[in-house]
Amino acid sequence: MDRLKRALRRINRIRSIAVLTGSGISAESGISTFRDKGGTWDNYDVEQVATYEGFSNNPSLVWEFYDKRRCEIKKTSPNNGHFALSKLERASEQNNVIFTLCTQNVDGLHHRAGNKNVLELHGNLWDAFCINCGLHVLLTETPLKTIPPKCSKCNNLLRPNVVWFGEPLCETTLNHAFEVMDCDILIVVGTSLLVYPVAYFPFLALRNNALVIEVNIEKTEASDCFLFVQGKAGETLSVITETIMDYLLDQNEKN
Ligand code: BV8
Ligand code: ZN
């Protein structure tokens, strides 16, 4: 962690910390990633299960895909990587540092680990809405009794409240994320950085002179642009967040 300590010393005062996570942070909870060997996209055709066209063609197939993931996620728990980030959020609050966690994940594990200021960039698979009247429904039963689930108000199809390929991210969320990337530290964890526009975010942070720390079990195409720390999220994040928390305490004592 000497590289991290040296990099932290170059920051005059830490006022804001951002985090960007992908499916790799949930891997140690037993949830498969998308593009690793044997991952989700090895077993499903993304066009069929993660696009609006796929949903229109076969809503039952798409709901079976999401319901299977919901059942798996229900049985898992947050891991040390998730808990390290909720600890960092509490320490940031105690030291008057703004903390925002942006996630591409739709599993809801960051909330379950205790993080509060979470921006779910691609939605959340526990939430659904009616394609006709827009009624939102929290779908907690697993497995679903009826596939595809219907709207209790107008009996039209419900769809998962997630962002599919070819769909724009929610504008408010996107604008908020752009603001969040104007930060002093960005920690990027467990993402291949292959999905846009989120893959641009670390470069926005770099342009704002942020210290960008990337945690991954292997290098991504962008790793040479960041302070790359190779390792599993669970172990590595605990060390990184402890180092940052010590620094926050120091900077508070000095002022
Ligand atoms: C849009 C749905 C436009 C929810 C997902 C340029 C600009 C804008 C768009 C595009 C563009 N170029 C191409 C596009 C189109 C497309 C895109 O990016 N395609 C890519 C594939 C080329 N983007 C879109 O379609 C986006 N929409 O731009 O709309 C628009 C604008 C106006 C009007 C109309 C349209 C929408 C993108 C969102 C798609 N939805 N998911 C769900 O079912 O989950 S994306 C999907 O990928 C998930 O959300 C996932 O989170 C995300 C990213 O994947 P990762 O999380 O990174 O997972 P991955 O498996 O890839 O990597 C895991 C990493 O973890 C690896 O690096 C691995 O090494 C590491 N790891 C593994 N274990 C561990 C670990 N690290 C640490 N510890 C471990 N233990
Ligand atoms: Zn309806």
Image (cartoon, helix red, strand yellow):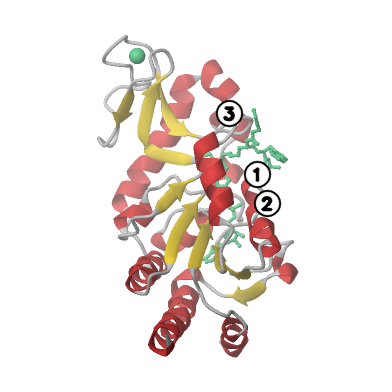
Q: Give the number of the mark in front: 1 or 3.
A: 1
Work out which quarter of the rendered image holds the N terminus and state it: bottom right
Q: Residue at x 42, y 30 (%)?
A: 160
- Tag in front: 2 or 3: 2
The amino acid type, in three-letter code, at marker 3 is Thr
Task: For mark 1, give the secondary structure.
Answer: loop
Q: Which residue is mark 1?
A: 197
Choose between 151 and 88: the one closer to the eye.
88
Q: Is mark 1 within 8 Å of ligand 1?
A: yes
The reply to whether callout 1 and callout 2 are in contact (CB within 8 Å) is: yes
Q: Amino acid at mark 2?
A: Tyr
- Which callout, 2 or 3, points at the residue further toward the start of the chain? 3
Residue located beneath label 3 in the image: 51
Q: Quadrant of residue 26?
A: bottom left
- Between disc 1 and disc 3, whose residue precedes? 3
Location of ligand 2 given as a quarter of the image: top left
Tell me, for residue 200, which label it has, or none: 2
Q: Secondary structure at mark 3?
A: loop
Q: Position of residue 31 (x, y in %)?
A: 44, 54
Q: Please say whether residue 137 is visible from this viewpoint.
A: yes
- Residue 143's tag is none
Ligand 1 within 8 Å, label 2 CB = yes
